[in-house]
Image (cartoon, rainbow, N blue to C red):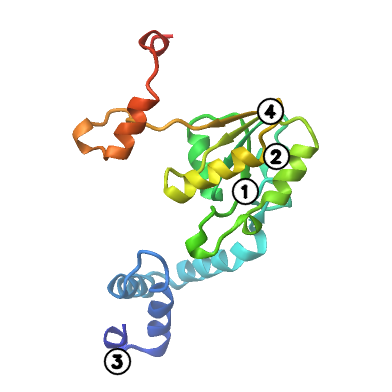
Amino acid sequence: MIGLLSGLPVSLAKVAEMLSGFPGVGPKTALRLSLNLLGRPADEASQLADAISELHRNVDFCKRCGCFSERGRCHFCDNTKRNSALVCIVEQPVDVLMLERGGFEGCYHVLHGRLSPVDGIGPENLRLDALDARISGGGVHELIMATSATVDGEATAHFLSQRYSGSSRVISRISRGVPEGSELEYLDEHTLHRAVSQRVVWESLRD
């Protein structure tokens, strides 16, 4: 990065250096973005700066479920039309946005991570106290484990299913298999194994 910044004005170099710290943004891309910002009208750059400044002031996480929020509780928890008895557990707030695209009508609980002994992330680092409080309050009839299909994600789902078992509450796991419209030759063996092991009866596909 030092070689690319050599000879640049200090202000331009500072922007490029800060942008290069973002995931997926290398030094050359950071420099191109910085030059693009410089070439735009000053009021656009000011609007971007204001939006970034407002990000931490206005956006927080829901005290109840952990999703994005601007006023203490998110609109998912405030929506009385959603099925509060059905709680879907996810790793990150962005996962909620993905599930919403699928038409899920229940509520969510965001862990803000997943168990990972290698990274030193244990149960105490996840938002389990808030989930304990929701469950002990009653009204939750099913917990859907929607953690990732990684080793850590599966371990997290297993841990949670054990933690909240022993009651009339249903604990389920989102199914995984062959994506719609995909070719088998492009799928990994883990996906194919899960698709076969979790196969459904043909008649149920036509209902």
Circle 2 SS class: helix
The C terminus appears in which quarter of the rendering?
top left
| Type of the residue with mark 3 | Gly
Name the residue: 47% across, 63% down.
118
What mark, if any, has residue 82 been given in the picture?
none
Which of the 4 image quadrants contains residue 170? top right
The earlier-in-sequence mark between 3 and 1 is 3
Mark 2, Cα crowd under 10 Å, few <14 / some 14-19 / many 20+, is: many
| Type of the residue with mark 2 | Cys
Disc 4 and disc 3: Cα gap in Å? 64 Å
Name the residue: 38% across, 71% down.
37
Disc 2 and disc 3: Cα gap in Å? 52 Å
What mark, if any, has residue 67 been given in the picture?
1
The earlier-in-sequence mark between 4 and 3 is 3
In this picture, residue 48 sits left or right of residue 202: right
| Type of the residue with mark 4 | Arg
The earlier-in-sequence mark between 4 and 1 is 1
- Front of the two marks 2 and 3: 2
What mark, if any, has residue 7 been given in the picture?
3
Residue ID for mark 4: 169
Mark 1, Cα crowd under 10 Å, few <14 / some 14-19 / many 20+, is: many
The earlier-in-sequence mark between 2 and 3 is 3
Examine the rendering and report whether any part of residue 64 can be seen.
Answer: no
The earlier-in-sequence mark between 1 and 2 is 1
Residue ID for mark 2: 77
| Type of the residue with mark 1 | Cys
Circle 3 SS class: loop
- Front of the two marks 4 and 3: 4
Which of the 4 image quadrants contains residue 14? bottom left
